[in-house]
Structures are given as structure tokens and as C-alpha cells.
Image (cartoon, helix red, strand yellow):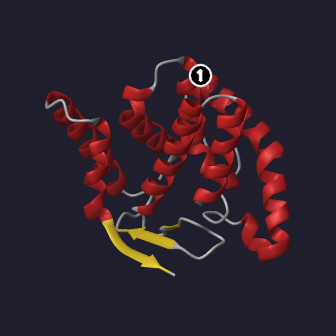
Amino acid sequence: MLQHQHILWTFLILFPFIKSWEEALIVLIFSVLPDIDVGYKKFQRFPRGIRKFLQLILRIIWNILYLPYAFLLSFFIGKKAFEHRTITHSLIPAFLLSFALAYFWSLKIALLALASYSLHLLFDSITVSGVKWFYPLKGLFIRGRINTGTWQVFLIDALFVIALLIFLNLKTPTWSLLLLFVPLIKEVKLF
């Protein structure tokens, strides 16, 4: 999935829970944080000011958190630690970062961060590449039917927004939109 889709879809689902600019910032950062393994320069479709701000925040996170984490894990799993959809596309860093946020900030911020990070993994799980949810440990692997960067993703965007409008009109909780992703899953494996 593309960065703007991760941000849009995550905000559409979590907006009822966001009550302050700090919470919105956490949702924004954690909705794209799993893709930090491909660098912090992936925001070409954003307005210049927003793009520069996101790149700055993610550059700081890249240097302080990602590089030491990847370097440490590279002793155990080799070069795979620096590949896309490996160590950052796992619930392990999501839980570690959420525990740190709960300790240093607040439980609500930690839960929003965990939800945003997890939604990123879910959205990437519907692609043909899939996600190993507990990498490098054994666990859950989910692969979907969607080819990233094709018309399929943009069709999903349109359907998702239409469904959101219908759900809001019916006063249905926004998190129930996640049920729309079930038919897009092709394979679920425990390994």
C-alpha cells in the first residue's frame, strides 16, 4: 500500500478516538512507521510542508530507533533485518514502542500507536506480498489478493470511502469497516 492510503484508512477508522493534536500526530506517525525500513523519503504525493515534516520526524526515528534495532537483529537473522516487510512489519516493535509510550506518556497514546501500527500491518496483509505478523519469530502469516500500485488499490480506496459514508449514516462504529477486508484475504498460515 502507499503511504497516503495507510494514513487515510487509519484516520478513517480511528478518528472517533482522536481528541487532540498529539493523538492525531501519533496516529499519523504510527500509521506509516512500519515502512521506515524503506527509508523516510516515501511521501512524494504530499504537499511540501507536510512531506518535509514527516520526513524529519521519520529521519529522527530512523536514526534513533530503526538502525540500532535492525543492527542488533542482524546479528541473529543476517541481512534480512534490513529487508522490507521483515522486522518492522511485525507486532514485536509495535508492542515494544507501545509499552514505552504507555510508560513515558499515556495509555491512550500507547493504544492509538498500537492500533495505528497494527492497522498498517492489516492493510499490507491484503496485498499479494502479505505480512508475517511476528517476524522473526514463527507465527501468523496473512496474504491477500491486492497487487500494490495497480488500479485494484485505488478501487479499494473508493469502496472504502463509500462504505465509510454508509457506515456513518447508519451510525455504525468505524472500526467495523475492517470487516470489509476479510474477502480480500487469500491465505492465512500459522508456521
Please name whichever residue, 82 or 141, is drawn nearer the observer in this view of the structure.
141
- The spot of residue 176 in percent (x, y) is 27, 44
Q: Is residue 182 left or right of residue 47?
A: left
Residue denoted by label 1:
22
Residue lying furthest top in this view? 20
Label 1 is placed on what type of residue? Answer: Glu
Residue 29 location in percent, x, y? Answer: 60, 36
Relative to 138, 6 lies left or right: left
Taking the image as shown, residue 57 lies to the left or right of residue 125, namely: right
Quadrant in which residue 98 is drawn:
top right
Q: Is residue 121 above or below residue 102?
A: below
Q: Considering only vertical position in the picture, is 96 above or below 57?
A: below
What residue is rendered at 49% in x and 71% in y?
140
In terms of image quadrants, where is residue 152? bottom left
Task: Determine whether the residue tagged by mark 1 lies in a helix, strand or loop.
Answer: helix
Of all residues, the one furthest to the bottom in this rendering is 191
**Which residue sits at x=74%, y=32%?**
56
Q: Is residue 89 visible?
A: no
Which of these two is toward me, 163 or 190?
190
Is residue 100 visible to the viewer in this orientation of the structure?
yes
**Frontmost residue, 165 versus 134:** 134
Q: Is residue 38 above or below residue 40?
A: below
Instruction: Answer above or below: position of 149 versus 28.
Output: below
Q: What residue sits 59% from the left and 60% below the top?
A: 90
